[in-house]
Amino acid sequence: MKKITIITIVTVFLIGCDKLDEKLRLVNISAKELFYVVSYKDDLIYNDNLDINSFPNFDTVKVGIIGGTGAWEYHINKRGSDSTLFIYIFSEKNITEQIIESNLYQKKGFKVKDLDSLNWIVTYPDDFE
């Protein structure tokens, strides 16, 4: 009886969990570690809740979003400024208001069709030029 209960709980947990759409990949072919923020907004506003992620040199990072297959497309088209996803690249992990106000970062906007043509693999610095 205990095994059946455990199997039932595990099954319900696995079925009930939201799946991630991890098709977006960021590739850093620069010689330095960078940091990135993915946003649906064209203008980045400083706040303590910025989701700043490490972007190691010569590495690939999977960027996931909850919702399963097609979630990226849905969110970009529904939430993105002009149906665009923006990727911000910083050279420092500690982002300050001054860094944002002085535009000391690189930004690139991608529409779903742009990401489709890149097979959802965005390479830095090549795709930011």
Image: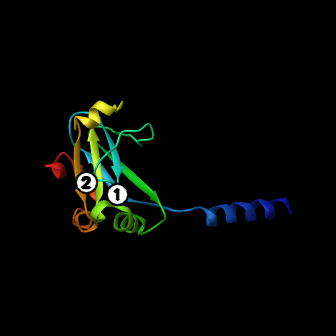
In this figure, which residue is indicated by the disc labeled 2?
122
Name the quadrant containing residue 73. bottom left
Q: Secondary structure at mark 2?
A: strand
- Crowding around mark 1 (Cα neighbors within 10 Å: few <14, some 14 to 19, many 20+) is some
Question: Separation of disc 1 and disc 2 at Cα?
Answer: 8 Å
Asked whether 69 or 72 is in front, the reply is 72
Q: Residue at x 21, y 34 (%)?
A: 31
Q: Position of residue 3 (x, y in %)?
A: 80, 60
Asked whether 44 or 66 is in front, the reply is 44
Horizontally, residue 51 falls left or right of residue 3, namely left
Q: Position of residue 129 (x, y in %)?
A: 13, 49
* Residue 24, numbered circle: 1
Q: Position of residue 72 (x, y in %)?
A: 38, 63
Tell me the colour scheme of the image. rainbow
Which circle's residue, 1 or 2, is located before the other in the chain? 1
Q: Position of residue 40 (x, y in %)?
A: 34, 56
Name the quadrant containing residue 112. bottom left
- Crowding around mark 2 (Cα neighbors within 10 Å: few <14, some 14 to 19, many 20+) is many
**Can you say whether 82 is above or below 44 in the image?**
below
Q: Residue at x 28, y 31 (%)?
A: 98
Disc 1 and disc 2 in contact, CB within 8 angstroms = yes
Q: Residue at x 39, y 40 (%)?
A: 52
Q: Amino acid at mark 1?
A: Leu
Q: Amino acid at mark 2?
A: Val
